[in-house]
Image (tube, rainbow, N blue to C red):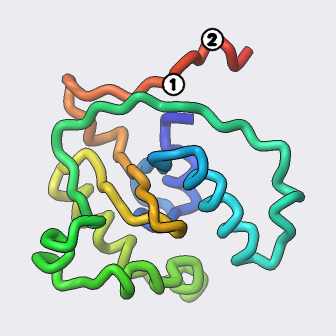
Amino acid sequence: MLTGEGSRRNGGRWNPPSSFATVYVAYSDVTALAESKANHIYYGLNPADALPRVIVAVDVRLAKVLDVADAAARKALEVSATRMRRDDWRASNRRGAESLTQAIGRAAYECSLEGLIAPACDGGKNLVWFPGNMHTSSRATIRNAHKLG
């Protein structure tokens, strides 16, 4: 769950397909479910068909992240929250193009940042990190992993 291998192969909002490993987590369980539901709705699927879901808590400590949920950071990047939110990264990828948010993620990755704090679909926040850029002092562990059996 913490390798980012699936998103490396398939891409996601903040990394293009066939690029770099990226792990996506939400700050809350409510946001995690909203993100999962939004993905199913995008493809015209019934969110109930994705059940059951396993939600895990992850303890993360990173040293160098870019907070694109912060207005000052977005201003420095010259990008609005609305523009990021409306970025249809899936449609861009179907056309063989990199989306706006994927370009931001790639730039963060190439600048050796460990990850991003990003706005979520429900107004909450997500944390996105790049396992390949994690510093030796940084950590990401699944809380109560022994219970996953």
Name which residue lies at 58% across and 85% down: 91
Expressed as whole percent of the image width and height from the top left, the position of residue 60 reads: 36, 32
Q: Is residue 95 above or below residue 3?
A: below
Relative side of 28 to 70, left or right:
right
Task: Name the quadrant of the C terminus.
Answer: top right
The answer to whether marks 1 and 2 mark residues whose Cβ atoms lie closer than 8 Å is no
> Seen from this angle, which residue lies furthest top?
146
Expressed as whole percent of the image width and height from the top left, the position of residue 85 reads: 44, 79
Relative side of 78 to 48, left or right:
left
Relative side of 72 to 7, left or right:
left
Q: Is residue 50 above or below residue 77?
A: above
Q: Which residue is mark 1?
A: 142
Expressed as whole percent of the image width and height from the top left, the position of residue 25 reads: 49, 47
Name which residue lies at 66% across and 69% down: 38
Q: Quadrant of residue 39?
A: bottom right
Q: Nearer the viewer, residue 67 or 134?
A: 67
Q: Quadrant of residue 47?
A: bottom right
Q: Quadrant of residue 98?
A: bottom left
Disc 2 residue type? His
Expressed as whole percent of the image width and height from the top left, the position of residue 30 reads: 60, 51
Name which residue lies at 65% across and 53% down: 33
Q: Which residue is mark 2?
A: 146
